[in-house]
Amino acid sequence: MKLQLALDRLTWDECFAIANEVRDNIDIIEVGTGVIKEYGMAIVREMNVQFPNHALLADMKICDAGRHEANQAFQAGADVATVMAFAPEATIEETLRVAKEQNKTMMIDLLGVESSQKVHQLHSLGATFVGVHLGKDQQKQQAFSASQFDIVKDVDVQTAVAGGVTLESLQTIKKHKPDVIIVGSSITAAANPAHIAKSMKALLHV
Ligand SMILES: O=C(CO)[C@H](O)[C@H](O)COP(=O)(O)O
């Protein structure tokens, strides 16, 4: 199980400062959607320069112009880019083609997906990696529930999980053995981000 740091709602300097603080306890750095909207692909490029030994995910949340936007992420140095499960099949297929051509990975974000039928359909399109996701706004109404893994349990795909993961909820989440656990605010808004990241990493290896 890998630990992915999600950098959201932060300034350029905060992104680099926090990533640097927790670098020894995370496997993947995610440049969040809002951060990309603020600073463009330049921040993905710079993250790749400053953290060459970490895998890098650009949370593009692509929903149209799949080839162009997947190329933007990969040319900026991302190893993984995201496309939304609700995007048209043509868009998802284009992003998967671009990733294959460049030996990169697309993560299909399952935000809003409630049926395993949809995940099977994505798998038949060629998806190999999906993200179970409780969105930021949804988190105000409900906490992450382990039942959210139900939609992926019968499908032969790698999984990530995101959405308000905390040190406490990690105990339950890890039992479902996702390939990647994505943590944003529990680390980035902590008084001591390095301590939380270290505790999370340690918990994943117990
Ligand atoms: O993709 C995201 C928001 O759309 C976030 O990266 C993801 O939800 C992780 O952040 P947090 O742990 O703060 O929920």
Image (spheres, rainbow, N blue to C red):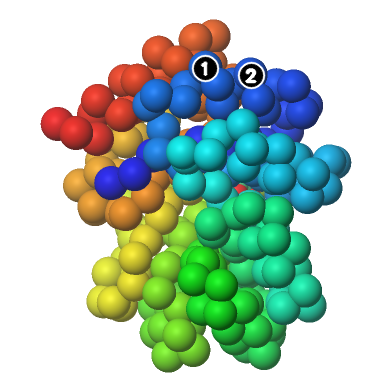
**Horizontal relation, residue 80 to residue 179: left or right:** right
Q: Are marks 2 and 1 in contact (CB under 8 Å)?
A: yes
Q: How crowded is mark 2: few (under 14 residues within 10 Å), some or many (20 or more)?
A: few
Could you say where residue 52 lies in the image, as x and y percent from the top left?
Answer: 53, 39
- The answer to whether any part of residue 135 appears in the image is no
Q: Residues within 10 Å of mark 1 (few under 14, many from 20)?
A: some
Could you say where residue 99 lies in the image, as x and y percent from the top left?
Answer: 56, 73
Secondary element under disc 1, as helix, strand or loop, is helix
Residue for point 34% across, 44% down: 2
Could you say where residue 168 lies in the image, as x and y percent from the top left?
Answer: 33, 28
**Horizontal relation, residue 161 to residue 110: left or right:** left
Determine whether the beta carbon of the residue marked 1 sits less than 8 angstroms from the nearest atom of ligand 1.
no
Secondary element under disc 2, as helix, strand or loop, is helix
Q: Residue 79 carries which label?
A: none
Q: Residue furthest left?
A: 206
Residue for point 84% across, 41% down: 39
Q: Name the residue under label 2.
A: 17
> Would you place residue 163 above or below residue 90 in this image?
above
Amino acid type assigned to the residue bearing label 1 in the image: Glu
Determine whether the beta carbon of the residue marked 2 sits less than 8 angstroms from the nearest atom of ligand 1.
no
Q: Mark 1 points at which residue?
A: 21
Amino acid type assigned to the residue bearing label 2 in the image: Ala
Quarter of image, res 112: bottom right
- Pick the quarter of the image with the C terminus: top left
- The answer to whether any part of residue 86 appears in the image is yes
Residue for point 34% across, 35% down: 169
